Amino acid sequence: MHYVVITLLLVLVGCGGEEESTTVDCSVPTNWTTVGAPFVYTWCTPCHSPSLESLEDRAGAYLHINFGSYEDVVAFSGAIENVIYEDAANPMPPGGGPSPEELDAVAEWIACGMPE
């Protein structure tokens, strides 16, 4: 009986209080073409396109923040992550955004190093 109680305590201690860690499977073909570009061109470039020359056309988006290419997106990757995941006061894009599945896909792409 003593061993049963100890075993149950070990199981309960081992299973409790820890958050489940999420692992990203980078062997799945997640890259700029399959995930990054569709996300950026759908949700970001309506305001952050280099072809938009005025603040009015860009819905107030800064003129110097453009996502016209993979290189542009990589250069601003830290800011993109912050706006998408952490800046609840200024969600992007304004007025609505990507589905949870799209956010998960782009999060995996970023976690895998934003492969081209």
Image: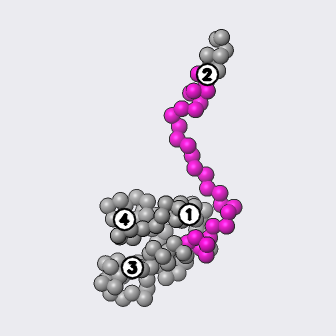
> Badge 2 is on which residue?
8
Q: Secondary structure at mark 3?
A: loop
46 lies left or right of 26: left
> Which residue lies under the disc numbered 1?
105
The amino acid type, in three-letter code, at marker 3 is Cys
Q: Quadrant of residue 79?
A: bottom left
Q: Is disc 2 placed on a helix, strand or loop?
A: helix
Residue 67 in the image: state x and y as whole percent. 47, 79
Mark-to-mark CA distance, 3 and 1: 21 Å
Residue 45 shows in the view? yes
Q: Residue drawn 61% across and 56% down? A: 24
**Residue range highlighted in magenta:** 8-36
The CA distance from mark 4 to mark 3 is 13 Å
Gap in angstroms between the C-alphas marked 4 and 2:
46 Å
In magenta stretch: residue 13: yes
Q: Which mark is residue 47?
A: 3
On screen, residue 74 above or below 50? above
Quadrant in the picture for the N terminus: top right
106 w.r.t. 46: above or below? above
User: In the rendered image, which residue does mark 4 sit on?
Assistant: 91
Instruction: Please tell me whether mark 1 sits on a helix, a strand or a loop.
Output: helix
Q: What residue lies at 56% left-to-right and 27% top-to-bottom?
A: 13
Give the quadrant of the C terminus.
bottom right
Q: Is residue 50 above or below residue 2?
A: below
Which tag, 4 or 1, sits closer to the chain's start? 4
Question: What's the residue type where badge 4 is placed?
Answer: Pro
Q: Earlier in the sequence, mark 4 or mark 2?
A: 2
Q: Is residue 78 visible?
A: no
